[in-house]
Image (spheres, coloured by chain):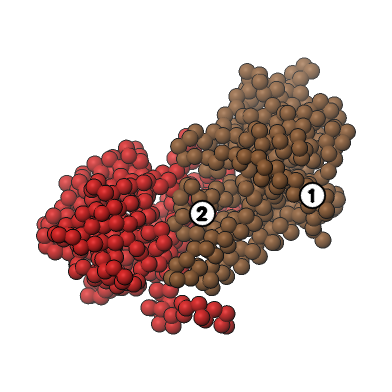
Chain colours: A brown, B red
Amino acid sequence: MPGTTDEQEELARTIRSVLEREPSPDRPTPQADPSRGYDAKLWSVLCEQVGVAALAVPERFDGVGAGVRELQVAAEELGKDLIPSPLLGSAALAARALLESGDEQACERLLPRLATGEALATLAWAGADGRWDPDEPACTARPDGEHHTLDGTAHYVLDGDLADILVVAAAHAGSVALFEVNPDQDAVTREHTPAMDQERRLATVSLHGARGIRLSGADGATALRRARDTACAVLAAEQAGAAARALETTVEYTKNRVQFGRPIGSFQALKHRMADMHVLVETARSASYAAGEAFDAGSADAEEAVLAATVHCSDALSTVASEMIQLHGGIAITWEHDAHRYFKRAHSSAQLFGQPHEHLERLLRV
Amino acid sequence: MDLEFDEATLAFREQVREWLAANVPERPLASFNTARGFEQHRAWEAKLADAGYAAVAWPAAYGGRDASLLEWLVFEEEYYAAGAPARVNQNGIFMLAPTLFSHGTEEQRARILPEMARSDRVWAQAWSEPEAGSDIAALRSTATRTEGGWLLSGQKTWSSRAAFADSAFGLFRSEPDSERHKGLTYLMFDLDAEGVQVRPIAQLDGEYGFAEIFLDNVFVPDSDVIGEPNDGWRVAMTTANNERGLSLRSPGRFLASAERLVDLWCREGDPADTALGERVADAWIGARAYQLYTFNTVSRLAEGGELGPESSVNKLYWSHLDVALHETALDLLGPSAELTGESAPDAGRWSSGYLFSLAGPIYGGTDQIQRNIVAERLLGLPRESTASKNRGAT
């Protein structure tokens, strides 16, 4: 049964208390340059006091040694307030890719810095078509003496222009391998790409004969699959958290907004819609927990559970966020209200790591 | 319903198409929710008016060309198919003007309509108030009698175009202590008049598509009352039907979007993705169905019928169609639909259109209001009891 242990409850409480105590990150403004990253101070507090970046890093690499399920707890709490953070790109996706590469030396060198939060990592993988296909990464690599030379442009790279550690998935000698690429070399250009969701930072990473070190060990495509499953499970929890808060806010508003002499929430037409939203929120939460647990337990149906959670949580947040707008009415069409942030997040998340129909096709094959 | 166009209509279509092909700006104008774009759109409207296309269905004396409703639909189809600029003065042309035709005086029509046609004066609507959204009859802004006119006070909100427009129209409570639909007067006022303060509101795409209007003893002469004092609700219902219904959302707009969606599918769609292909087809069929329904309405009106509560059917239909159409386009584009700025596909048309479509089921009367109108006035279902005494009854 998917659920939450006492330790996980405690983790959630700790994160909530940090978020309550620390000043909220600035919200995006319509006029400002949308090239905002995350709130570095809040992230460092979360790393130092809670160890969020270290959660899924094994103890031998100075991590907490917990699992995907714990990353989900953090993602759900941060997701409620849509706090921009490198949790998904660095602590989930890139950290898992490094771990799954099986390159112990690289892990020893990189993961401890990632775990403390002093360094951000990212994984450059998908092409312009936005398919996170483990067998067809955007970049290519060829041997060059002791090292490798990499070319190509990866798109939708999470925190791609900010990261200190750049892991690149590249086609290499008929298969796929992972490479560590120093992002500060001239042959690497990184550009922030403004998106509708201003609070999830994406970039393109272009390699023009960049030098890289191959991460030795496991098959790259398998590592990418595992990394994607981790990221999808964590994203699903974030979506469940965001959906829960979107519903909560909507319920509160409709209890207080009076039209026709009564709170609009007393109208059955609205009440029933919120009841449906509640069903989605609860099932999304359960589906996301189940995915994290199946992954951590190494169970045979883990991929299936992750795919189900990915599709269901995307659908749930998309529906709940658009209902949030409709049930709020005019106020939700304004910038100053939060509804559009939830809506934009819902849309951007549903496209990240592959489109819903691609996940469904995979699910049918599993 | 007669779907055969006669030769005169076909010739009109050809003439409109040629004029648009020669005159629609090649580069899209800046959004009319920016100061720069607003003036660009004003200039475009003047050009339209010079050619007699600003308000084709109006009498020529006011700047129209006496076109029939059917010709108006044809004009709209061509207008949107040509990708011509959005209509900055649509509040005036499609909401205020029909009200003036029904309830205005000859003096008002002669004074207001020609300058509206040229957009020398651009109009904002001022319906909603903070406590009166869906429940518009709950409005509190007041009109107090004074010598030669009225003094307006109170607050309006969600006033479309008010950030940059010249004038506005709306309802005010003119009978102190009156309740609900009674004691309201329909008035027009200038947004730069003494006592008016406009505070633009950033909408969810960051642009100033609407504003709050604060009124403090703003003088309005008697000549700017539409209809009789205290009869404003009845007068306003004409406007409401026009905003919701036929006028504002002609099928041409959705047909043009549907055609663009089909093009996008042919260019970028994955033929193996049959589920998405079906949604594209559904959206196209939906736009076509809306067109046919509108033709039907026009036929009915041509035979002397009234628009009436049927306009709620239009509003419900197009607002959902518009959302579905854009959702389908965004799913088709995949993650690239997320991008804004230079790297966005089709210059970001689909994602900005999507955000705009979200407001469709809200403005001009929410879905819930429209559904109540359809259920109660078209289907004759009993009204929901509004009193709290019935709460808990099953």
Q: Is residue A178 left or right of residue B319?
A: right
Q: Chain of mark 2?
A: B
Near mark 1 (Cα within 10 A), the count class, few <14, some 14-19 or many ≥20, is few
Which amino acid, by three-letter code, is at mark 1? Glu
| Residue found 71% across the figure and 46% down from its top | A17
Q: Is residue B228 left or right of residue B252?
A: left
For residue B94, the mark is none
**Rendering coords of residue A49 (x, y %):** 76, 37
| Residue found 35% across the figure and 56% down from its top | B156
Q: Quadrant of the N terminus of chain B?
A: bottom left
Name the residue carrying label 1: A10
Q: Chain of mark 1?
A: A
| Residue found 85% across the figure and 49% down from its top | A298
Name the residue carrying label 2: B327
Q: Secondary structure at mark 1?
A: helix
**Rendering coords of residue A200 (x, y %):** 60, 40
Residue B23 shows in this picture: no
Above/below status of A144 relative to A20: above
Which amino acid, by three-letter code, is at mark 2? Glu
* Structural distance between the alpha carbons of marks 1 and 2: 40 Å
Q: Nearer the viewer, residue A48 or B101?
A: A48
Q: Is residue B58 left or right of residue A354?
A: left
Residue B182 shows in this picture: yes
Q: Nearer the viewer, residue A94 or B186?
A: B186
